[in-house]
Image: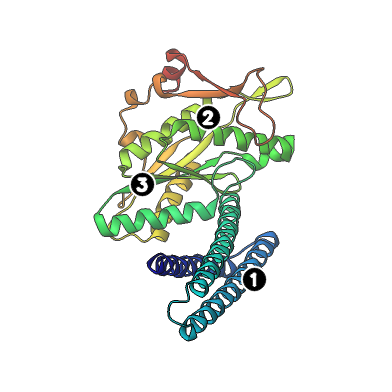
Amino acid sequence: MIASLFLWDCILVVSVFSIAFLAGWFVHEFEVRRRSRQSRESRRLARDVLDNLHSLIDNVSADMDQHNDCLSQVNEELAVAVTGDTKLVATALSRLLNANSDIRRRLESAEALLKEQSRTIETHAVEARTDSLTQLVNRRAFDDEMNRCFSAYRRQGRRFSIAILDIDHFKGWNDAFGHPSGDRVLAQVAAILTHQVREMDLVSRYGGEEFAVVFPGTSLVDATRVAERVRLAVAHADFVLGSEKHAITISAGTAEVRPEDTITTLIGRADAALYESKTAGRNRVHFDDGHAMRPADAILDFHAVSADSVYMLVADDGRLPPLGNTAELDIYQLAPETCAAEE
């Protein structure tokens, strides 16, 4: 029996340290968030969770103090007890069991609260990294992925490439048709992008009408091929406004990480290639190979960018989906002759 009680005490100590560790982790995470740029809602949530954690730690500490006091009292009673007083020993053991049962219940309640707070943080973290209009990840998530890929490149030599894409004449579209229509264009282009890349690639809304894609483990040739595929898919998609169909095009720039790169210079090279696509007439892709900026057809076999890999997205009834909603989009493969005309 005494051995069982000792085991219970060990379990209780481990539980308390686990709670303290988790609470410390929460405090650290929110301190990081506090130092970053956050919305008022983010700061409010951080304060609420921290207040709850401080209260939880205080309560657990008080419970442990009370438990230890009970153990000390029982121990003192046993120390002065007459040898062989089985009734006193039985009473003491009963009190110890009750005390351990009570503290276990309190610790389980504390752990349940920590799990609830953890779910709250996870939900908020996802929302904080998602663009509500396009449902793509936002610039913060893009920056995190760039840091991860760059670290893997420095440690393991694992290559990666990026693409920056921009909707052509988007300001003119907004001026002519209004911002709600522009929002629908952004959502549809985002849906096309998502369907043209691999699951492992990260597609983000970079800002305004710009999108960025990170291609882990991908060469410049393959990243440029995907960018060209996306360009073709957007160019062949119908953007419906009222009873009229409109064409939208995008321009893109790609770059692969090089030994002399920093994250800033890599993004700068892809952005410069995008600018080259704009100045060359838009609706095209350029790449930066570290020496010069060139059009996509300088490295691509255009037969590899065929109708078999180009898709357009439209709603079931021919209209754009509701704002920010891509669930109603269907994928329709283009006819080979349509793609051949583009080539």
Locate the N terminus and report the quarter of the image it occupies. Answer: bottom left
Q: Are marks 1 and 3 in contact (CB under 8 Å)?
A: no
Q: Earlier in the sequence, mark 1 or mark 2?
A: 1
Q: Are marks 3 and 2 in contact (CB under 8 Å)?
A: no
Tag of residue 234: 2
| Whether residue 210 is situated above or below residue 313 in the rendered picture | below
Q: Are marks 1 and 2 in contact (CB under 8 Å)?
A: no
In terms of image quadrants, where is residue 152? bottom left
Tag of residue 200: none
Question: Label 2 sits on what residue type?
Answer: Val
Give the crowd class for mark 1: few <14, some 14-19, many >=20 residues within 10 Å. few
Locate the C terminus and report the quarter of the image it occupies. Answer: top left
**Residue 314 percent location from the top left of the image:** 60, 23
**Residue 116 percent location from the top left of the image:** 60, 54
| Whether residue 12 is situated above or below residue 189 in the rendered picture | below
**Residue 138 percent location from the top left of the image:** 55, 50
Comparing marks 1 and 2, which lies closer to the viewer?
Answer: 1
Count of marks overlaid on the render: 3
C-alpha span from label 1 to label 3: 47 Å
Secondary element under disc 2, as helix, strand or loop, is helix
Residue carrying label 1: 55
**Residue 11 percent location from the top left of the image:** 43, 65
Lateral position of residue 338 relative to residue 106, left or right: left
Residue at 57% in and 60% down: 105
C-alpha span from label 3 to label 2: 21 Å
Secondary element under disc 3, as helix, strand or loop, is strand
Lateral position of residue 118 relative to residue 284, left or right: right
Question: Label 3 sits on what residue type?
Answer: Ser
The residue closer to the viewer here, 130 or 26, is 26
Residue at 35% in and 33% down: 297
Question: Label 1 sits on what residue type?
Answer: Ser
